[in-house]
Amino acid sequence: MSRHHLVVTVDNHRCHRYGICEAEAPEVFRLTVDGRLDYRRRPSAGSRDDALAAARGCPMQAIHLEVR
Ligand code: SF4
């Protein structure tokens, strides 16, 4: 198993809280009741594909993924 892991960051200035990321990767992204976007900065390896789909699907290109 790879020791590298995915690091997620979201640009809050770009994000308009459309929630597409939550639909693609609910285990990583979650819109809170008070309208914020909550997300796991280091999702598990099993969530990697979903996180990639979320980043691709974000209409604001607000999701940045990095492998460290
Ligand atoms: S899809 Fe993009 S703009 Fe929409 S809530 Fe997620 S990060 Fe924000």
Image (cartoon, rainbow, N blue to C red):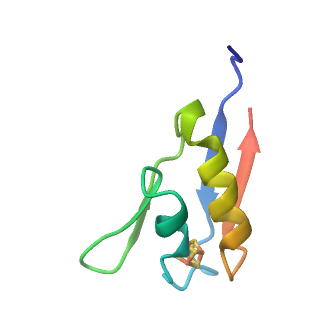
Q: Residue at x 52, y 33 (%)?
A: 44
Question: Could you say where residue 37 lies in the image, as x and y percent from the top left?
Answer: 42, 69
Position of residue 41 relative to residue 21, above or below, is above
The quadrant in which residue 55 appears is bottom right
Q: Nearer the viewer, residue 7 or 45?
A: 45
The quadrant in which residue 53 appears is bottom right
Image region (quadrant) for ligand 1: bottom right
Q: Residue at x 61, y 52 (%)?
A: 51
Q: Residue at x 69, y 81 (%)?
A: 60
Question: Could you say where residue 7 lies in the image, as x and y percent from the top left?
Answer: 64, 42
Q: Nearer the viewer, residue 42 or 2?
A: 2
Q: Residue furthest top?
A: 1
Question: Could you say where residue 20 lies in the image, as x and y percent from the top left?
Answer: 54, 75
Locate the C terminus and report the quarter of the image it occupies.
Answer: top right
Q: Residue at x 51, y 57 (%)?
A: 25
Question: Is residue 1 found left or right of 28 in the rendered image?
Answer: right
Position of residue 30 relative to residue 44, above or below, is below
Position of residue 44 relative to residue 32, above or below, is above
Question: Is residue 64 found left or right of 38 in the rendered image?
Answer: right
